[in-house]
Every structure is written in C-alpha cells, then in structure tokens.
Image (spheres, rainbow, N blue to C red):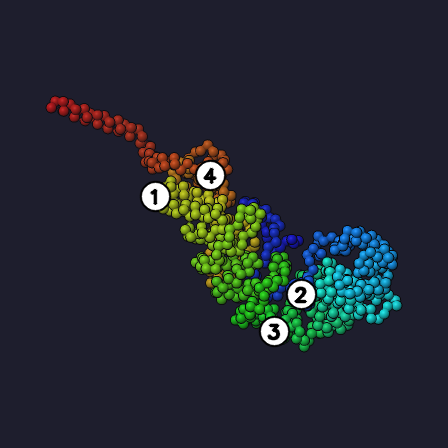
Amino acid sequence: MFTRNWPRHLLCLSLGFPLSSAVACGPDFPMRLLDNRGQSLAELPEGNFRFEISRLGQAITGLKNVSEIVYSMDAPDYAVQRGDAEQAGLTVPQQALVKELRTLSDAHQVEAQGASLPTELRLYLAGAVAFSAGDHGLAADYFQKVLALPADQRALRSTWAAYSLGRALFAMSSEADAAPDLLTQSRKAFEQARQLSIDGFSDPLELGVASLGEEARVARTAGDWDSAIGLYATQNLHGSAVGYTSLKLLMADLAAMPDEQLAALLKGKPVQQLVTASLISRLGWSFGDQPPNEQKLIKLLQNSTRGSLDNADRLAAVNYQQGDYASAKAFLEHAGDGGLAWWLRAKLAMREGDKTAAAAAYAKAAQAFPQNESWGERRTPDWDFETLQPKCRVEGESAILALQRGDYLQAFDQLYRSNDIYWFDAATVAERVLTVDELKHYVDTQVPAPPALTQQDRDNYVPLSVAAKLRNLLGRRLLREGRYDEAPAYFDSETLHHQAKSYGELRHDAESKWWPSKRAFAYYNAATLARFSGMELLGYEMSPDYATFGGNYSLESNELKVGPLVAEEEVRRQQASAAQPDQRFHYRYVANALASRAADYLPHTSQAFAAVLCAAAGWNTGQEEKSAFYQRYVKEGPYVDWALFFGERCPYPDFHNADKRYVTQALSPIRATLRPYKKWLEMGAVVAATGIALVLINRRKRRLRQ
C-alpha cells in the first residue's frame, strides 16, 4: 500500500531463533501515542485536503452523484461510453443510422440523411458533427434548436444539448471576433444542463455533474476565482474526481502567482479557504524543509486575514502548525465551539502547563467532533502511519493525561474506543498498567464475546476484531498469573479454549499429584504446551513477545521513566506486570523452567530424566540454556545411545518405567557407601548364614528328641 524507507523502529524478523535473528524490512506499523507522549500532545497532525475541500462546496438538491462505473479506473473510454449511451432507447434501424451519421463531417448532410430520426436526435447529431469539425457557431445553432423543441419532444437529448451548447459557446469566446457576453452565455448553458438533469431529462453520461467543472473553467477564464473554486468544490461533493484534481491544480496556480496578484485574490473568502485547506493539509510536502511557495502563501494569508472571523479555527490551525502560538490563540477567540477549535485550545493549555484546562478542552473537542469524521491516512516523521479520525485522536491524547493523573480505566477506555487505530496503546495499558482484576471487570461488563471466526475466515486471514483481541489478551494474562480456571472462557477459538484448559489442568496436577512421576508428567506436558503454543496462550500482546504480530516482528521499546507526563505509580505498575523473564519469547523460558521441574521429580537413572532434558535443550531458547540442560544430563543422567544427538533427536519420556527406578535410585547411595567393605560384608554374610543354619539344625534336633 505504501512505499517505506527505514523507520526509526528497528524491525526484527525472527523465525524462531532469537540468537540468529534476521533483520528485515517489515510491514507498515501504526503510530503509538504513548511512544512519545510529549510529541503526541504537542503536534497538530496535518489535515486532509480532500476532507478540507469538502467543507467549501455545497451540494445541489436533486442533482445525483456520479456513479462508480463512469469514473472508475475500469470505465471504458469516454467515446465508447458516449456511443453506448447514444444507442440507448433506439430501435435497431435507428441505432445503425446514428452510428453511420456519426462518421460524417458535414452537419447539413447529417440533417438531410437523418430525416427519418426523431427531430431531437437529428438536430443534436448535426450539432455534434459541427462541433467536431470546429464549426462552433453552427454547432451552437443546432443545440439551441434542440432546446427550443417542446419538452415532450426532447426527453433524450435536452441535457446533452445544453451541456454541448455551453462548450460551443466557451470555444467561440476565444475566437477573434467573439461577442463579449459569450462566457456569460456559456455559464448559463451549463446551469441549464444541471437543471435539466435535476428535472429528469436523460443524463446517462452524468453531464449535470460534469457541467460544474465546465462552468468552473469558464469562471476561471473570466477571472472569477471565487466562483471557480465553489463550482469545483461542489463537483467534488457530488463524487467527481475532476473536482478534487482541479482544486489541486488551482492551488498550484495560486502558489505560482506573483505576490501582488495573489494578495488581491486572497481578499475573497473561497480563495482564503482553499489556501488554508492546502496549508493545513501540507499539500505538496510533508516533512523536511518547507517549500518557499508555502512560506509565501502563509505570509500573504496572514496579512489578508487580519481581523477576519471567517474560517477562524482553520486559520488558528495554520498558525499553530507554524509555531505562531500567539496568532493561533487570537484566532481561537473567534473560532466558536467546533472540534478543531477545542483541540487547539487543549494543546495551547498544555503549552502553558494547565493540565486541568487541557483535559476540559479535550473533553469538549471529543464531544464536538463527529464520530465518522476522518482525515484519511498520514505518515508521521518516524514513518509510521496513522488513520486520522479526529475524535479518536483527541480521546487518545486525553488518555495520556488520564494516565498521568492515575485514571487508568478511563485512559484504557479512551484508547480502546479507537478500535484498531490505537490498539497498540490500548494493549499496552491493558496488560501492563491495569491490574488483572480491573481488566477482567472491564471485559466482563463492556466487551461481550463477538461471534467466532469461521474456518473459512481464518483460512482467508480475516483479522480478529478488537474485542476478540482484548479477550484473548485477558485470557493469556490470567494464565500467566496462575488463574487457570478463569482463563479458558476468554479465548476466541475452541482450539485455544481447550489448550488453555489443558494447560491449567496440567499446572494444577503438577502441584497437587502425590506420586513424583505424575508430577513430572504434568510439568513436562505443560512445558511442551508453553513452548509450542506459548505465543497464543501466554504471550504478551506487545513487548516483549509481540503476539499482535504473531511474534514475527518486534518494535523498539524504551524504558518507561517518571517524568512530566508519566507518574511514579504507572511506572510501578508497568514494572510489576513485566514479563518474567523480560525477554522476547519469554514463554520459552517458562517452558524451560517447567521442564526443569519435571526433571527434578524423575529418577536421574531413568530414560525419562534424559529425554526431558533432551527435549528442553532443543526448544531454541538460546545457546546458554541448551548448554545448561546438556551439562545437567552429563552430570546427573544415565547413558543413552541417542545422547550424541542431544537436543535434536529425543524420544518421548517413558514416565511409566521411570517408577521402577525410584527404589534403585534410593538404594544407590547406600550401595556406594558400603562398596569399600564388600569383601568383609560378604564374609560376614557367610558367617551369619552359617550361624543361622546351625541354630535351625539344633532346634530341629531338640524337637526330634522330645
């Protein structure tokens, strides 16, 4: 979707081997408001030119918007569209005749050979042929004849004739002997075309909307910039890409004008609004040095708008973006109660250190911005992207202040309501700042389980909803904190639900079973689940595991420190909820610890002891951990013929036969202690056996004598 240079964040693509990670250029990452809180509060993001110009025009009641087909990239050539439209509503013989007449170059010949056609068709075709031949005066005569027919006799070509008449008159205006009022007549013809379209006359080519752009061109030629801007803006509102593109071109023409000429035009409100829309949107540039033309526009705009109350919030925004905070504040005194005005007031209050006033202004801005207002996508200076919906952005900035004053649930709620836009920030607060009970209560009361994705959805990589992601995050956090019975219900799929339940049961068995091999079995299988399903069951949504990326990427993470926008309590909460250990793929270390506990409960002489250590050594946690498992095996374990491939080819631990080794292992220390006295013990055993035999013999003899 976007081209991307190296970002500030280092994107690390790891395919399961943290010690040999491949550094690669990853996907586009969304902006994080909490990453640089001061910058997030201080900057006013650039606006969106398309949105800004939508405020300039005024839709015409009854005029239909353009269809997607006519103006889409898949639309056929306009001449082909026109040819198809000309055939509509005609009989087969009429269609053939119209197509034939279109090939002629003499309008009078067209009129003669088309005698069998309805009058409106014959006259319009004659005018069209004359226009193509460059005889604009004759063409205008024919189009006027069409419009002079009774209304019921020109249902098919009225709109066409008025539109074409406007074009013919405009073309005539540039000729040497042109009448002085031709531009005015041309504009009236385009107005008539729109009205005919509104009145229901045939308009398959959507000439009613197209006439706005044509009339704007006439107005621009006559030097009427204000009317031209308004017409193009209205054309844009009716869905025409021509209106949007034309306004960009007009803006380029304005920027290239001499200062004196531009200063005169800036006295008109539409020109002021267009220039302001361009400056707010940084049309033509984004980051780096500001182009000289932009600086000229700003200076001339500021001079022309002194004392003006129109467009005050936008003018305040331009001044704020340029760092002229005094002028921005002055304009805001006349800016009313719009969302942008209150947003700017909040930022100015922050600059003055008044966080209370800033919080109040943010609240009013959030109420004033419509929920569906969108300024499109933008790039940050760090080359992240942001889908800029002002209401969500305002609430996100307000969340920074809520965090600073300790209103953690409010901060989370404001970030969570942005859906995917600021999910990274919401996830950070959910798993690092809120307590697990605070998060669980919020989810239980505010976030019902959404419908599960079908297998087809999963096969097609349909993303999870934010609600499902939050519930998964809570489920993983509950498992990490040992609340095994509560966790399974929050996972979005049956597979994860069953795995979470199994993991909890295994962890419970590992602590409660009486027989050692049963504990070892539970620890080992819990370790296996943690290793191979740990991202889904135990992983942090953000740092250090980045389950949000499936673990494939990580973002640069700065240590949170107490400061003007970060309170000590938030730092303490984040430290308390950090991963243990705080390393990427932390669940692998959890798996290692569980496997080590499993080995603790197994006889060291058993195959199971060696197999558990072998498996754990191959879990790619790191060379240090792998070496530690191997050294433990060498020091404590039995000889096995597969030890040459330790950590690579490991059989499943034989827990059942390990039971037989408990007695042997218990006697081994005694045997080792007595081994130096083996001969004396053997002699003693013989003597003892002889003595016992003699005693038994004597007892037998006495019984026989009795």
Residue tagged by mark 4? 614
Q: CA distance from mark 3 to mark 4?
A: 71 Å
How far across and down, in percent of the image, does residue 516 sit?
36, 41
Q: Which mark is in front, 1 or 2?
A: 2
Few, some or many residues within 10 Å of mark 1 (<14, 14–19, 20+): few
First in residue order: circle 1 vs circle 2:
2
Residue closer to the observer: 438 or 418: 418
Residue 420: quarter of image: bottom right
How far across and down, in percent of the image, does residue 531 sit?
48, 45
Q: Residue furthest bottom?
A: 307
Q: Which residue type does callout 1 highlight?
A: Trp
First in residue order: circle 1 vs circle 4:
1
Q: Which residue type does callout 4 highlight?
A: Cys
Residue closer to the observer: 167 or 396: 167
Q: Secondary structure at mark 4?
A: helix
Q: Secondary structure at mark 3?
A: loop
Going by the image, does 561 lie left or right of 516? right
Going by the image, does 53 lie left or right of 427? right
First in residue order: circle 3 vs circle 4:
3
Residue tagged by mark 1? 514
Q: Secondary structure at mark 2?
A: loop
- Say if mark 1 contacts mark 4, CB within 8 Å: no
Residue tagged by mark 3? 336
